[in-house]
Image (spheres, rainbow, N blue to C red):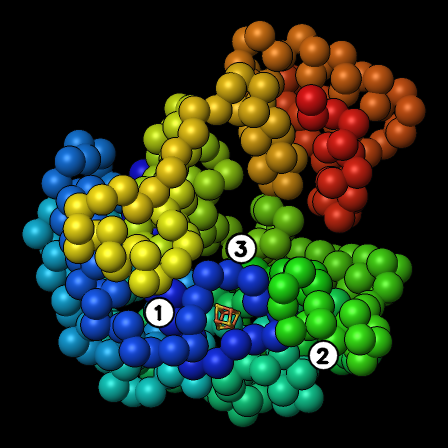
Amino acid sequence: MAGIYIHIPFCKQACTYCDFHFSTQQTLRKPLIDALCKEIDDRLSKSATAFKTLYFGGGSPSILNADELQQLFDVLNKHLDVSELKEVTLESNPDDHTSEKLELWRSLGIDRLSIGIQSFIDRDLKFMNRAHNAEEARHCVARARAAGFEALTIDLIYGIPGQSHTEWQSNVQKAIQLEVDHISAYCLTVEERTALHHQVEKGHVEEVSDEEIEKQYLFLHRKLEDCGFEHYEISNFAKAGKRAQHNRSYWKGTPYIGIGPAAHSFDGQQTRRWNIANNPLYIKALANNTPYWESETLTETERTNEILITGLRTRKGVDLNQLPESHRNSIQAQTENYQAKHPGLLVLEEGLLRMNPEAWLLTDQVLKEVVF
Ligand code: SF4
């Protein structure tokens, strides 16, 4: 299912752990929205693909005002009928859930909100420098529902330094009580060039141990499955029929186009392309009609590795028939070697290679021995 991703590279403030492409300086908002519109216009006018999903990510798309969003939707609607798409998602932060914005999003045709709650505890939110507080985290889902949104997914973070296991259990319980049909949960990782990395390097913050992370992950997996969610990808849980449609493009290798600075695109075959991750240079290149992206053609080995890296983190696993023919036999042989050395981690059944969800945290270790 082909999708369009639009990257909005602005945030109110910088979360300490974040290494996405964003700016807290708002001065380039106007020229950047103009550049996004130009890229949408250029790329959709040249594309013959029937797009099914639209996803606004970032950064913080919910920071945009009515004029900015309207400008983006006007150009999108020139090329496709947004109301006909199967899923139109906007990433939102709880502090942006005002009644005016919720109404605006609905009126534009956004039918799914991905809400960055992360934690229901004020201490965690302050520690991560999130812009919202625990009260907004508790009430944002009800507000979105009251505004008419039915498809809601919330993000949680586990492995937060200073959070006890009991507090994590309570966060998961609170998420369940919100009765959303989709939950994403990510492990907090300490990425280089982030404020959190600096805090850890200086000894001001102690990273959570691997044992505690595994304990939190297993609690999450078991609790949500007990409550009727299917753990269908390492970070994603859905009630029946409620899996995220846009993100499946990434895991299934279907085409998608990424618009905006730092956005990636894939043609569904072997070509990847990525836009420059720099707001002023992106704006300038669009204005001057000069290239603002780089691309690469994946070799069969690179494509094989990509399919394994993404597929092994999904419930379904990897269909060996999806792999380039030249690599199927060797992957099968490497799998059998791995199974002999580490029984029980990798399963190969009826041409499908998969891992037990309880072992997904070990995927990186497994991949080191199975990929080329
Ligand atoms: S709101 Fe999202 S994109 Fe922005 S700094 Fe925080 S985590 Fe990063």
Counting other residues with Cα less than 10 Å from the Cα at mark 2, is it few (<14), some (14-19), or many (20 or more)? some
Residue at figure coordinates x 30%, y 55% from the top left: 282
Residue nearest the observer in this picture, 154 or 291 = 291
Which image quadrant is residue 257 in? top left
The numbered mark at residue 238 is 3
Q: Secondary structure at mark 3?
A: strand
Residue at figure coordinates x 46%, y 71% from the top left: 115
Q: Secondary structure at mark 2?
A: helix
Amino acid at the residue labelled 3? Ala
The image shows residue 6, relative to residue 97, as above or below, that is above
Q: Position of residue 63 (x, y in %)?
A: 34, 77
Q: CA distance from mark 3 to mark 1?
A: 23 Å
Q: Is residue 28 left or right of residue 161?
A: left
The image shows residue 217, relative to residue 365, as above or below, that is below
Residue at figure coordinates x 63%, y 23% from the top left: 352
Q: Secondary structure at mark 1?
A: helix
Q: Is residue 138 left or right of residue 113?
A: right
* Quadrant assignment for the C terminus: top right
CB within 8 Å, label 3 to label 1: no
Amino acid at the residue labelled 2? Ser
Q: Is residue 22 left or right of residue 260?
A: right
Which residue is denoted by mark 2 in the rendering?
170
The image shows residue 314, relative to residue 143, as above or below, that is above
Which residue is denoted by mark 1 in the rendering?
61
Q: Nearer the viewer, mark 3 or mark 1?
A: 1
Amino acid at the residue labelled 1? Pro
Which image quadrant is residue 45 in? top left
Residue nearest the observer in this picture, 5 or 342 = 5
Residue at figure coordinates x 27%, y 73% from the top left: 29
Please state the total of marks drawn on the protein image: 3
